[in-house]
Amino acid sequence: MAASVYLSHASFSALMPSSIRSSGIPPKPRINEGSVQGYGREALLLMLEYGFGILNLHRIELEAYSYNERALHVYEGLGFKKEGVRREALYYDHEYHDIITMSLLEEEYRKKFRTEGQKRSK
């Protein structure tokens, strides 16, 4: 029998009225180092396509904890840009950590992934 493993949770929060067309993805705790890799990136790609394609959002933002270097690497790889840092805003595991705000615009997302999709199909 296969075991179930909880990897993470993702959702659109603070969805603004359609005139603003912006949403945020709340930060999540670190995933165990031994967990299966690749699911987070795939889940985020699906969320981005849903947010930009179905919900017609213009901008998606997220917050990430500075200790979660793997997540920051994934977000940057997807095209998210760092916008700001709330210095030592989180106390976790007996240490203070920064909270990093990042965002991705629809145009940036479409440019990055439309080009990659065209390369794959040829």
Image (cartoon, rainbow, N blue to C red):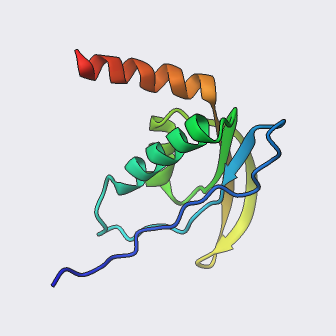
Image position, residue 8 (x, y; %): 47, 67
Image quadrant of residue 113? top left
Q: How many marks?
A: 0
Nearer-the-camera pick, 56 or 69: 56
Asked whether, in this view, residue 104 is left or right of residue 90, the answer is left
Q: Is residue 107 above or below residue 75?
A: above
Residue at figure coordinates x 83%, y 45% from the top left: 17
Q: Looking at the picture, how far across and down is residue 11, in whole percent?
A: 60, 59
Q: Position of residue 47 (x, y in %)?
A: 52, 48
Residue extending furthest left?
1
In the rendered image, the quadrant that contains the C terminus is top left
For this rendering, which residue is in front, 56 or 117? 56
The answer to whether 65 appears left or right of 9 in the picture is: right
Is residue 44 shown left or right of residue 60? left
Q: Nearer the viewer, residue 15 or 42?
A: 15
Using the image, determine if residue 24 lies above or below residue 11. Answer: above
Q: Quadrant of the N terminus?
A: bottom left
Residue placed furthest toward the top? 122
Residue 18, given in percent of the width and then of the height, sits at 79, 40
Which residue is drawn at the image coordinates 59% and 55% (left, top)? 66
For residue 5, what is the image quadrant? bottom left
Residue furthest to the bottom in view is 1
